[in-house]
Image (spheres, rainbow, N blue to C red):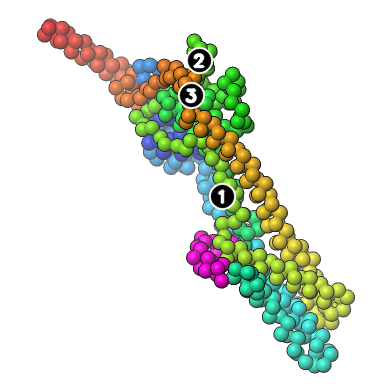
Amino acid sequence: MAPNPTIMQAVEQLGYRVTVGDVATQAGLNVMQANQGLLALASDVGGHLQVSNTGDIVYLFPKNLRSILRNKYLQLRLQEWWKKVWGVLFYLIRISFGIFLIVSIALITISIILIISAVNSDRDGDNRGVNFSGGFFFFPDLFWYLSPDYDTRQRERRREKSNLNFFESVFSFLFGDGNPNNNLEERRWQEIATVIRNNQGAIVAEQIAPYLDNIGEGYTREYEDYMLPVLTRFNGQPKVSPQGQIVYYFPELQVSAAKKRRQSLSAYLKELPWRFSAANSGQIMLSAGLGIANFVGALVLLSLLRDGTVAAQIGGLVAFVQGIYWLLLAYGTGFLVVPLVRYFWIQWRNSKIAKRNRERLFWANLLASADAQLQQKIAYAQQFAAEKVLGNEDLVYSSETDLLEQEIEHSQQIDAEWQKRLSRGSGE
């Protein structure tokens, strides 16, 4: 089984020398999961275990661990290959909607021109009906021109920049650009672990509440059930003060392989609102205009093809378009309905996000303006705060060297320490 990619990334970001607490904090992982993952990764890449005199373990990994794993696991090689292939395939899927829109408009417009030309030719041999086609190609421009703030929007469209080309903007107009909070749970647990680490492994529930959901704004000190998932994930332990207040400390998150500065983070977990599209206003209006032109053109073509005799007489392209007409109409309808439904869905979704953000902000403000009782509770929690940084001088065993060599080296260190003490004693 291939190693956990989240743990691999955390090890790389932390400099290849880590503790379980380091990885759990960096990745927001369950302490037990981080421990098992580090053991598996160390076994796979030939990592080393370093044991301190307090029994804490540091994991040391080679810096080429990805190359080692890539050579060892076919699954990793296939994952990397599929990631590249899927990137190309998904891009083709994205631009296909814009391509089909242009093809649909072209087929509908040309079919209308051919039908009108044939009808007029049968009537009086005159091809004047060809002029009927102009409005469909220039319908988007007409849509913009009829807008009451046409000049203002034109200037804004020139100023706006978008990283999307036309075909990508069509997909963005239809389906948006993905969930902006796709990694919300990962962010949540990373920030909670960072709060714990910044407070040296000892916290109160009010410090964690701004990063959780469904607590509500009803402030009750008696019930802190929402802390149970945090305790389970990071192997925390509750303590009760003489005043009956509960605090929590997390021994595994108090141990680190290297000294780390206090990390800055937001006062509460802020969910990002959904955007309708990453395309600029000009691209959105162009997509909408082309969609309307396509739909109107499909309705006009339906009236011309209704009796079915025209397509049979003309044949060729017109007959082909009649054969796929319902596909064109379905696409044209969906092109307008999907963004409309998605727009109202986004409004509903963003109202829920705003409500959750307000609740978290409430708890953040409560913490920022802590009363005397809460300050007393935080002060009691600090009695359990500790920070243990494991350097080479703290190690009593490492799998890098032979056990006998380490015993000899350890004995020499003890003898040297005794010699120093004896020399200081005789000098006095």
Per the image, the residue denoted by label 1 is 82
How many residues crowd mark 3 within 10 Å: few (<14), some (14–19), many (20+)? few
Residue 386: % across, % down: 39, 20
Q: Secondary structure at mark 2?
A: strand
Q: Secondary structure at mark 3?
A: loop
Q: CA distance from mark 2 to mark 3?
A: 21 Å
The answer to whether 351 appears left or right of 31 in the picture is: right
Q: Main secondary structure of the magenta part?
A: helix
Please state, as top left, top right, bottom left or bottom right, where the C terminus lies in the image. top left
Tell me which segment is drawn in magenta.
151-169
Q: CA distance from mark 1 to mark 3?
A: 55 Å
- Position of residue 377 relative to residue 125, above or below, is above
Residue 207: % across, % down: 50, 28
Whether residue 162 is in magenta: the answer is yes
Closer to the chain start, of discs 1 and 3, is 1
The answer to whether 385 appears left or right of 314 in the picture is: left
Q: CA distance from mark 2 to mark 1?
A: 49 Å
- Position of residue 426 relative to residue 322, above or below, is above
The answer to whether 185 appears left or right of 19 in the picture is: right
Q: Nearer the viewer, residue 244 or 405?
A: 244
- At label 2, the amino acid type is Lys
Per the image, the residue denoted by label 3 is 371
Per the image, the residue denoted by label 2 is 239
